[in-house]
Amino acid sequence: MNTPVVAGGILIEARNVHKSFGQTPALRGASVAVGRGEILAIMGPSGSGKSTLLHCLAGIFAPDRGEVWFDGNRLDTLDEAARTKLRRTAFGFVFQFGQLVPELTAADNVAMPLLLNRVRRRTAYQTAGAWLEKLGVGDKGGRRTGELSGGEAQRVAIARALALGPKVIFADEPTGSLDSLTGEKVMDLLVSLAREQGTTVIIVTHDARVAAYADRVVMVRDGLVSLDLGAAEAPAAKHAAKAAN
Amino acid sequence: MSVPLTLLGLLEREPSHGYDLKRDYDEYFGRGKQLPFGQVYATLGRLARDGRVEPGEAEPGDGPDRKRYAITDLGRAEVDTWLADPVEPEPHLQTVLFAKVTLALMLGKPAEAYLDRQRAAHLVRMRDLTELKRTGPLVDVLLADHALFHLEADLRWIDLTSARLTELAEAVRNR
């Protein structure tokens, strides 16, 4: 499949990526390019390789063959320590569940990646508080995340993903455990805030209503990106025009 | 559902009499609502007038019309265009899509590619409606929700049909 022209330049890209687990191939030459500030949805049937593609793009899995590029540099050739650093500084993650530490408070969870990046404690907690406020869960900062509802926990997870000012947010079925209305509010916040910050978002979902929030949708089938459903009419320009008004 | 285009599609398999076309139409697409003979012959007459089909010589025998009709190149091109064009995404389009998929499989045409185009058209419409929801008043949100759930149901049908294409192709060809 040809690399599409991406408005604003390519930020992250998989080129002909292969990945197997034992004898089972998950990706068989998948290629996709994602632009700066673009919101991309990756869809596909169960077992198609869509989550594996996300994990390869995020440097969580190293591909068996092929290349992953981020911001003009090879990501797949970095050693584990360098990839971990990149994940901690440039990437944010929102998964279906399990990314928060349930014994810690919402504020602790959001502040933790900042503290790991040597942000001063006071600044880290102020930043965490501000992001929790933006996500509408400012009053939950002192609550343990294990005690929060699914929707509240996902808002905390988004606050944590955005607090570091990442270049890319990777979201794997971010509304998978939420009811329709809560899922919609979570997606609305994720997309609005990402656009406001100019953050690229890559969402893996089987839900067409979640994919409809994206600027562009690609389908993964049998380990290949088989279909690019095209960008909405100049999304970057559209958002810029809206912001200017 | 477009009766003229469906009849044209059936004629692309082989030249047929009006009676055979009606029988096949009723079997595949009628679903309890048979096509009247009068409508079959009137439609064939219009298609012949417009150069989409060519009537053969009248054959001896009983019945109102014993001509065998053959599709023309113009008719064939029209069927191709119709099959490849995504249907306007709106609720209750399954009957048209169903006819397209069945005919495409019958004729050995790329049904999967047609379904992909339909999937793309649906997702674009869903994206527009989602944007409307994000910016519009609550009444628009409710209307958009209604349309989105129907479009989502169509997409699930498209996904399932895509997964069943090989099986469906065998069923249609062996019938």
Image: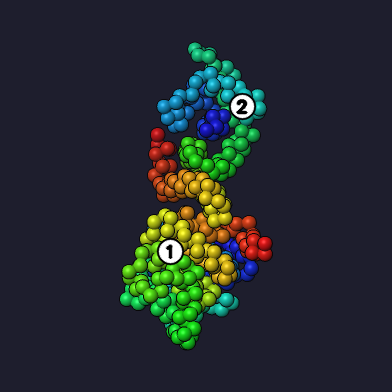
Residue A226, compared with residue A73, is above or below; it is: above
Q: Position of residue B169 (x, y in %)?
A: 43, 42
Which is more toward the observer, A123 or B92? A123
Q: Which residue was labeled with disc 2?
A: B47
Local packing at callout 2 (Cα closer than 10 Å; few below 14, some 14-19, many 20+) is many
The residue under the point 55% across, 59% down is A216
Tag 2: amino acid? Leu
Q: Are marks 2 and 1 on the same chain?
A: no
The residue under the point 55% across, 42% down is B87
State left or right for residue B175 relative to residue B97.
left
Can the viewer see residue B127 in this picture?
Answer: no
The residue under the point 47% across, 54% down is A208
Q: Position of residue B138 (x, y in %)?
A: 52, 50
Label 2 SS: helix
Chain bearing tag 1 is A
Which is more toward the observer, A163 or A65? A163
Local packing at callout 1 (Cα closer than 10 Å; few below 14, some 14-19, many 20+) is many
Residue A105, compared with residue B15, is above or below; it is: below
Q: Quadrant of the image for the N terminus of chain A?
A: bottom right
In which image quadrant can residue B7 be found? top right
State left or right for residue A116 relative to residue B65.
left
Q: Which residue was labeled with disc 1?
A: A174
State left or right for residue B2 relative to residue A46.
right
Distance CA(mark 2)–CA(mark 1):
53 Å
State left or right for residue B31 relative to residue B122.
left
Chain bearing tag 2 is B
Q: Position of residue A45 (x, y in %)?
A: 42, 56
Q: Quadrant of the image for the C terminus of chain A?
A: bottom right
Can the viewer see residue A70 in this picture?
Answer: yes
Q: Residue furthest front?
A: A139
Residue B156, compared with residue A15, is above or below; it is: above
Q: How is the image coloured?
A: rainbow
